[in-house]
Image: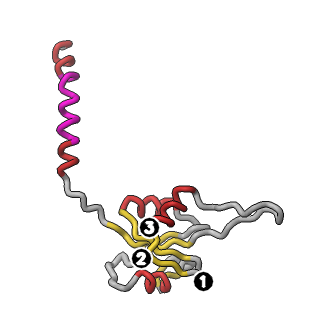
């Protein structure tokens, strides 16, 4: 029995190499998604204190990196992000920072128009 366990232990690196090769051989077609975000307002605790950014460093970096449209009046931003980033943003959504997919049905409207139509208070397109 010990010999069999020892043989399996020695074969483990080869199994991992095979798995890595299979992963590397898969097509790299991560779908990108258009997501709308309403960034929360800056928080000020006292008049003499500086404003405190309610966004995490990751959220701020995602918005800065993937922004494709911005509605200054509404304070909303459209982001074209990889699927996994969209999933993380949606998981982090809150009342202070609503997040929703724009054009889940594959609409061909420009991001600016979709963003203008987004009703973040009702979390749907108007």
The x and y percentages for residue 54 are 64, 61
Indicate whether residue 12 is drawn in magenta: yes
Q: Quadrant of residue 46?
A: bottom right
42 left or right of 106? right
Which residue lies at the image location 46% right of the left edge and 71% below the top edge?
Answer: 67
Q: Circle 1: is it few (<14), some (14-19), or many (20+) Cα within 10 Å?
A: few
Which residue lies at the image location 83% right of the left edge and 62% below the top edge?
Answer: 48
Q: Kindly report the distance in space between the C-alpha atoms of the residues bearing marks 1 and 2.
A: 18 Å
Which residue lies at the image location 58% right of the left edge and 70% below the top edge?
Answer: 39
Q: Nearer the viewer, mark 1 or mark 2?
A: 1
Q: Quadrant of residue 10?
A: top left
Residue interval drawn in magenta:
8-20
The answer to which of marks 3 and 1 sits earlier in the sequence is: 3
The x and y percentages for residue 98 are 54, 70
Determine whether 125 is above or below 51 in the image: below
At mark 1, the secondary structure is loop
Assess whether mark 3 and mark 2 are in contact (beta carbons under 8 angstroms). no
19 left or right of 95? left
Which residue lies at the image location 50% right of the left edge and 66% below the top edge?
Answer: 64
Give the residue number, with chain letter if any, for mark 2.
Answer: 102
Assess whether mark 2 and mark 1 are in contact (beta carbons under 8 angstroms). no
Give the residue number, with chain letter if any, for mark 3.
Answer: 66
Q: Nearer the viewer, residue 72 or 108?
A: 72
Determine whether 124 is above or below 25 in the image: below
Determine whether 13 is above or below 86 in the image: above
Q: Circle 2: is it few (<14), some (14-19), or many (20+) Cα within 10 Å?
A: many
Magenta span main SS: helix
Give the residue number, with chain letter if any, for mark 1.
Answer: 73
Q: Kindly report the distance in space between the C-alpha atoms of the residues bearing marks 2 and 3.
A: 14 Å
62 left or right of 15? right
């Amino acid at each position: 029995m010990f010999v069999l366990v020892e043989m399996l232990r020695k074969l483990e690196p080869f199994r991992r190499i095979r798995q890595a090769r299979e992963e590397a051989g898969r097509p790299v077609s991560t779908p990108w998604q258009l997501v709308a975000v309403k960034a929360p307002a800056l928080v000020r605790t006292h008049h003499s204190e500086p404003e405190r950014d309610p966004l995490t460093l990751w959220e701020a970096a995602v918005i800065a990196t993937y922004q494709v449209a911005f509605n200054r009046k509404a304070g909303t931003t459209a982001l074209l992000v990889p699927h996994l980033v969209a999933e993380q943003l949606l998981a982090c959504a809150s009342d202070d920072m609503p997040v929703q997919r724009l054009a889940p049905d594959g609409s061909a409207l420009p991001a600016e128009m979709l963003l203008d139509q987004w009703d973040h208070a009702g979390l749907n397109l108007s």
